[in-house]
Amino acid sequence: MSENRKAAIAAALILIGFGLVAYLMPRIMLAIGAYSPWVAGGFAVLFVLAFFMVFWLRARAQRKRN
């Protein structure tokens, strides 16, 4: 039970963190886009990749533990 609770808390914190960045994404994109639209697009792609990468790395670490 304790392990499931830790996993749920970790997932919730990750989702809240990414949700906050996603909420601020338009402002971030406009600020970066003033410098370079290509860099702004790259940031958006990296954000999406990071979202999936965090959960993939977490699942991989849990599999090694078990």
Image (cartoon, rainbow, N blue to C red):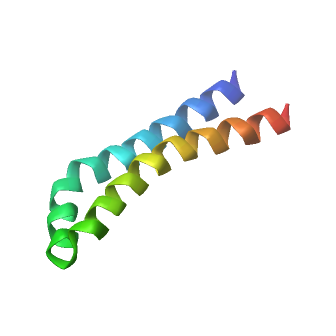
In the rendered image, residue 8, in percent from the top left (x then y), is placed at: 55, 30
Q: Residue at (62%, 33%) from the top-left corner?
A: 7
Which residue is nearer to you in this view: 29 or 1? 29
- The image quadrant that residue 66 belongs to is top right
Left or right placement of residue 64 versus residue 28 in this view: right
Q: Residue at (65%, 25%) from the top-left corner?
A: 4
Which residue is nearer to you in this view: 32 or 1? 32
Left or right placement of residue 47 versus residue 7 in this view: left
44 up-or-down from 59: above or below: below
- The image quadrant that residue 64 belongs to is top right
Q: Residue at (18%, 69%) from the top-left corner?
A: 33
In the rendered image, residue 35, in percent from the top left (x then y), is placed at: 20, 79
Q: Residue at (47%, 48%) from the top-left corner?
A: 49
45 up-or-down from 65: above or below: below
- The image quadrant that residue 5 belongs to is top right
In the rendered image, residue 59, in percent from the top left (x then y), is placed at: 68, 35
Q: Residue furthest top?
A: 1
47 up-or-down from 33: above or below: above
Number of numbered discs visible in the structure rendering: 0
Quarter of the rendering occupied by the N terminus: top right
